[in-house]
Amino acid sequence: MTEEENDYRQVIVQIWYPAKLIEDTAPAAYFPEVEWVRAGFKSQKGDFPQKLAEDFERYNRVLSYSLPGAMIDETENIYPLLLFATGGNMSRHFYTTMMEELASQGYIVAAISHPYSSMDFFPAGGFLMSSQYWNAPDDASVEDKEELDEELSNYLAADAKFVLDQFSLLNQNDPTGRFTGKINLEKIGILGHSRGGKTVSRISSTDDRIKAAVIYDNIGPHPERASGLKQPMMTMRRPWGEAGEESLHGYLAKTGSYSYEVVLDSASHFTFSDMPIVDPENYKSEGDPVGNFHLVMDYTLDFLGKALKGEEGELLETDENSKGVRVKKFNSLK
């Protein structure tokens, strides 16, 4: 909230973590607010929102592997923290499988829903999608488009900073007792898909608490492309055109640490979410969606293990391309 404008933004954060098994506990719904979101689509004009409302009914029949309300597993005394930034007009629920896999490997993971960027149901605002405010008209100048991009990047990074601040408070004294003393605030990473790459780049360039950055199928705002990040980073993407690759390689080469580019040849833009698995009819994938999911997670965990846990990073250090995956390492030029 700002004193000048008496304004605020509401963000929603959903947390996954290594949990103690609770016998005879039903798993959580995959998309608990789906009926509210469907009602939001139905209130919109046009055929496409109505089709989405119909398509989304299927999520009522999907369960996750998560156990709601479980206490944190105490096998480890303290766990690294990962933030996850959703893509534009994507719900945090569409990354549930990824979040569960990361949590199962010893991370506390927090997915952020941003108002007017994510597509979700917000208690203070109801059903919200990406605002047209961020979509510059086709005839807008380059300067106007970059100004809008900067403003959006700042909003998204401010949301992520706020979330980090709240985790610091939870680590000091969680009223539920779940996270007190369990969060390793010296080992924090952030991952983001699509528009979430703006969040990843901007908070990584402005907040020293971030120690590792992962961007799926995007690059980041123009200032970060020009300066690079100081943290270790990895981008994982589908095949792009030459111009996009040149821009990305310039960004990765300016890192203050090490960085990797991982190209998954059979990927689509939505491979880096659950969509090809939970809705294969509308989100088709060239490769096996489950196989692609495992590749995305294997390389992600390899990178995070190296950047946050001091592990070797075996997959990222090989030139093997037998699985349709190409890896390129960039050494620091700073």
Image (cartoon, helix red, strand yellow):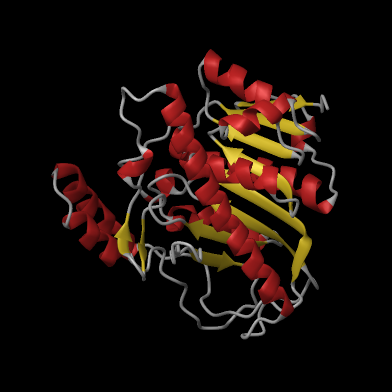
**Residue 211 locus on image (x, y percent):** 76, 49
Q: Is residue 323 visible?
A: no
Residue in front for this viewpoint, 64 or 50: 50
Residue at (53% x, 74% y) in the render = 67
Residue 251 lies in quadrant: top right
User: Horizontal placement of 307 versus 199: left or right?
Assistant: right
Query: Which of the 4 image quadrants contains residue 80?
Result: bottom right
Image x and y of residue 259, in percent: 74, 33
How many numbered dots are placed on residues in this image? Answer: 0
Q: Say if residue 222 shows up in the picture.
A: yes
> Could you say where residue 84 lies in the image, as x and y percent from the top left?
57, 53
Residue 146 or 191: which is nearer the viewer?
146
- Farthest residue to the top: give it: 242
Q: Is residue 77 above or below residue 191?
A: below
Residue at 67% from the left image edge and 84% from the top image edge: 177
Taking 308 as reference, is 67 left or right?
A: left
Foreground residue, 296 or 94? 94
Q: Is residue 203 left or right of residue 306?
A: left
Q: Position of residue 126 (x, y in %)?
A: 30, 65
The residue located at (60%, 26%) in the rendering is: 324
Viewer-side residue, 178 vs 3: 3
* Residue ID at (20%, 48%): 49
In the image, taking residue 232 as reference, residue 59 lies left or right, namely left
> Which residue is at the far left?
46
Where 19 falls versus 330 (above or below)?
A: below
State the image quarter where residue 276 is shown.
top left
Q: Which quadrant would the C terminus be assigned to in this image?
A: top right
